[in-house]
Image (cartoon, rainbow, N blue to C red):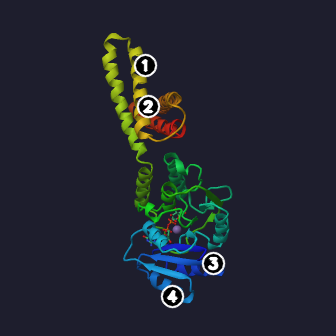
Amino acid sequence: MTLLSIEIPTYNEAENLPVLVERIEKLGMDAEIVVVDDNSPDGTYRVAEELAARFGNIKVIRREGKMGITSAIREGMRSAGGEYIAVMDCDLQHPPEFLPVMLEEATRGADVVIASRYVQGGRSSFGAARKLVSRTATGISHLLLKQTRSIADPLSGFFIFRNGVIDPSCIRSNSYKVLLEMLVRGNVRKVSEIPYAFGTRLRGKSKLGIGEMIRYLRLVLQLSDYRALKFTLVGSAGVIVNEGLLFLLAPHTPLLAASAMAVEASIIANFIMNNFWTFRGRSGSGLFKRLAKYNTVTILGAATNIMVLAGLVFVHLEYLAANFVGIMLGFAANYAGSEGVVWT
Ligand code: GDD
Ligand code: MN
């Protein structure tokens, strides 16, 4: 049995593939290379076949047309015979010389070894805009997907995993972020990250665009069981509870007292809905302690709302617009607190 299968999805990488393959071959590892090409117009497939004839350890899978990096990786996994599987880009942004280091770490017992841009010592050669996109995407993942919180770079495209810990069928989306799906849906226990420097593309251009970003957001929502949406719905239901109770109490209760009761009732109602629906199955502290925490989080959310409102009015923004921004940020604070503090 081969020790390592190196999976390389390719789309228009005719110029890069020979360089990458030669650098891998030079390492002299006990490895096979699985190229999964989507019938690239630039003839990557032919280049791959030539390389396969030259080196004995290359499998080439040619698919009918562009079906996406993720499904390419899934398909490659199915024909990978190695004890470990590595996934990497073809454009040399992922230095192949790093594979032996990652493999060694994997054989020491990790289920997944990630070449990480964001642990101490890691780097990426992104420009400011792409860096911001990448950091924001990582932040969204940490916020919404608990399984990724302890991982600095869950969006890395360069990683190794033990063949068998991840069932190919758990990769269902068509986003770029296959590792994320593996971490959330696979049977992964021990993850290890090693810092590396993410380089610049050798030739050709990246396929990341606005479409990929939308697909990413959809993926995270899906993987998070749509919690952010459920939380929003619950929040709207809370408005009805608050207004309804105020309507019932106001005629025979002082307004401020009526409002305080209505607000607290809506907080409790929201807590119950979030506890048994939005965050169903999530553990944490006991029910009453959780309620107390939720109350605190909501108060902080309200404080955020008010402070943002005051701040923006101070810089002369119209007060209703300022309040809207405040509501959004207050809501975000509530959600973050619920994810990270109340239902951990
Ligand atoms: N078979 C196939 N089909 N391969 C594809 C397709 C496709 O539809 N689209 C892209 N690829 C291949 C590319 O040829 C390349 O080898 C690899 O997938 C990554 O594509 P890039 O376009 O270079 O992606 P990137 O540099 O923007 O993003 C990469 O790095 C990120 C950060 O590590 C990817 O690896 C991301 O998954 C990763 O998050
Ligand atoms: Mn790339």
- Where does the image place residue 223, in percent across and percent down from the top left? 44, 52
Q: Earlier in the sequence, mark 4 or mark 3?
A: 3
Disc 1 marks a residue whose amino acid type is Ala
Is the residue marked by circle 3 packed among few (<14), some (14-19), or many (20+) residues within 10 Å?
few
- Mark 2 and mark 1 residues within 8 Å of each other at the beta carbon: no
Disc 3 designates what residue? Answer: 30
Q: In front: 184, or 82?
A: 82
**x 53%, y 50%: residue:** 147
Q: Dot 1: what SS?
A: helix
- First reached walking from the N terminus: tag 2 or tag 3: 3
**141 or 130, nearer to the observer:** 141
Task: Give the mark nearer the N terminus: 1 vs 3.
Answer: 3
Q: Give the residue pinned by disc 1.
A: 260
Q: Position of residue 187 (x, y in %)?
A: 52, 57
Q: Earlier in the sequence, mark 2 or mark 1?
A: 1
Residue that carries the numbered disc 4 in the rendered image: 50
Mark 4 vs mark 3, foreground winner is 3
Q: Which of marks 1 and 3 is in front?
A: 3
User: Horizontal placement of 231 versus 164: left or right?
Assistant: left
Marked residue nearer the N-terminal end (4 or 1)? 4
Query: Badge 1: how crowded within 10 Å, few (<14), some, or many (20+)?
Result: few
The amino acid sitting under disc 3 is: Asp
Mark nearer the viewer, 4 or 2: 2
Amino acid type at circle 2 is Phe
From this view, report whether residue 250 is shown above or below residue 31: above
Instruction: Decide if ligand 1 comes within 8 Å of the CB at mark 4.
Output: no
Q: Which residue bears the numbered disc 2? A: 271
Name the residue at 50% across, 77% down. 35
Pick the residue in front: 109 or 138: 109
Please state if 136 lies on the left or on the right of 248 as rendered.
right
